[in-house]
Image (cartoon, helix red, strand yellow):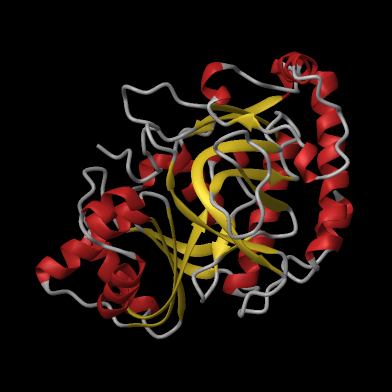
Amino acid sequence: MKHLLAAPVYQLPQKQKQALLLARLNQLSARHYVHCPEYRNILQAKHQPILAADYAQLLPLAVRLFKQLRLSSVTREQEFKLMHSSGTTSQVVSQVVLDRATASLQSRVLVNIMKQWLGPKRLPMLIIDHDGLTKNKQGYSARGAGVQGLSFLGFDHCYALDENMQVDWPKVEAFYQRHQAGPVLIFGFTFMLWQHFIKPCQSLGKHLAFQQGVVLHSGGWKKLQAQAVDRATFNQTLTSTLGQLKIHNFYGMVEQTGSIFVECEHGHLHAPVYADVLIRSLDDLSVVPIGQQGLIQVLSALPQSYPGHSLLTEDLGQILGEDDCPCGRLGRYFEVLGRLPKTEVRGCSDTFQ
């Protein structure tokens, strides 16, 4: 892992990065084979080699397995925190077991990634949520995990909503007065940012003319698409409501917290050096070439306490290229096209009721 931590986040050519990452993924496979009986049983049942010669040989666990099994490679005494996926009250949620080392690694990598987009300094942070999400220190929901993880990037945290999901205007306006002219970080899950902040701003005719804002958002596009809000409309409306902004969507999941895929100025999601993506065929799960659509498989160097380093998501996507994005970042870049048909669509912000 030390070689990955020492490497540039987006400046290794794909071939060089893949060699480093595969070595780490094989290390994790061997660890989980020894310490997680369920993972070992799956590999044996599939007659799968423990060590992969290339990405295609990495067995992806279906992400929904974390809703059916408590997969762990640490003892109960070593458990530090239990993370839960997003889900409605009627759903079974995923359980992701973290020890202190994995939680620390996740935080370190997330900060490393986000420094590439935000710069080296922490920024005043406006969080479009309420502060009750992170009060349970023993475990977080996916929303809580997102807020907690990204809060390390900021200071003077202002939670814009109260627990009834109404905008706390005195707090927001005081934050605006303190930080209008300087760089600020605004974070919210996509639908909640739109529904519980931008729309109330519009209905009241409020405009916050931040001069150097950076917006990070993730998840929950399904409900926006139902309102005929696409990426261009979303970004344009945020800019007209909140001022001069750089806006970055990102793709991630609680089952691989820390190794997120951030969208560049050309609308492409980029794999950092700590993570990568494959696309597998809907017909036979074989790896498909660049430009062909299929199921997204996500790879991460971080999951030490549970076998989550190679996961098959329920998201459809396609790899757009590698080492040649116009933004200049190297490695693979891709897009997410939606959910697998007949799979319940949910995102961190879609689950607010």
Name the residue located 52 percent from the left edge and 71 percent from the top edge: 123
In the picture provided, is 168 more to the left or to the right than 30? left
- Percent x, y for residue 310? 69, 37
- Percent x, y for residue 325? 63, 74
| Closer-to-camera residue (110/15) | 15
Q: How many marks?
A: 0
Seen in the picture, residue 145 relative to 87 is either above or below; the reply is below
Name the residue located 36 percent from the left edge and 33 percent from the top edge: 344
Name the residue located 23 percent from the left edge and 55 percent from the top edge: 195
In the picture provided, is 263 more to the left or to the right than 111? left
Q: Residue furthest left?
A: 204
Q: Residue furthest front?
A: 283
| Closer-to-camera residue (248/125) | 248
In the picture provided, is 210 more to the left or to the right than 10? left
Quadrant of the rendered image containing residue 319: bottom right
In the picture provided, is 94 more to the left or to the right than 159? right
**Residue 94 appears anywhere in the view:** yes
| Closer-to-camera residue (319/266) | 319
Name the residue located 53 percent from the left edge and 43 percent from the top edge: 253
Quadrant of the rendered image containing residue 239: bottom left
**Residue 153 appears anywhere in the view:** no
Seen in the picture, residue 145 relative to 292 is either above or below; the reply is above
Seen in the picture, residue 202 relative to 157 is either above or below; the reply is below
Name the image quarter holding the C terminus: top left
- Percent x, y for residue 341? 39, 37
- Percent x, y for residue 106? 67, 46
